[in-house]
Amino acid sequence: MVNDHGKAGRELALLAERNGLGVPRDMDSGDSSEVRHLSKLSGPEFGRAHMDHMINDHQKDIGMFARMATEGKNPELKTFAKRHSMSWKNTREEGYRDKE
């Protein structure tokens, strides 16, 4: 999963650069806050909180990919979104299964 996400992230960064779009280099304040929260947890409590965050984050990503795949103006980014939306859905589903 980490390798797939890393590869997709690098591909998206190249597409963004090629199309003159900026790529954030740092986490946004919400993600930084989540990291601080998770860093205070351990054991099963950490596992549950991390899994909840991952599932929610992937749900947001899936919505973003779906919008880009159907409403996007840039053909390369639309193709990227269509190609990767299923892997994000699969990862979210893995999270649901692991949570049970």
Image: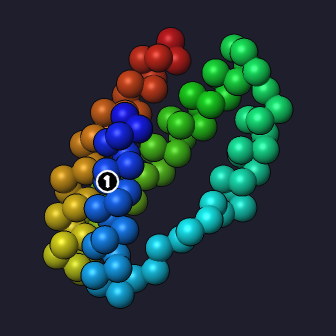
Is 59 displayed left or right of 15 in the figure? Answer: right
Residue closer to the observer: 19 or 73: 19
Q: Residues within 10 Å of mark 1 (few under 14, many from 20)?
A: some
The secondary element bearing badge 1 is classed as helix
Residue closer to the observer: 98 or 68: 98
Is 59 displayed left or right of 14 in the figure? Answer: right
From the top left corner, tell me how far across and down residue 56 is, in percent.
54, 41
From the top left corner, tell me how far across and down residue 38 is, in percent.
74, 35
Q: Which residue is mark 1?
A: 8
Rendered position, 85 above or below 10:
above
- Name the quadrant containing residue 67: bottom left
Residue 93 visible in rendering: yes
Amino acid carrying mark 1 in the image:
Ala
Q: Residue at x 19, y 72 (%)?
A: 76
Q: Residue furthest right?
A: 40
Quarter of the image for the N terminus: give it: top left
From the top left corner, tell me how far across and down residue 21 is, in percent.
40, 82
Q: Residue at x 38, y 24 (%)?
A: 94
- Name the quadrant containing residue 66: bottom left
From the top left corner, tell me how far across and down residue 84 is, in percent.
25, 50
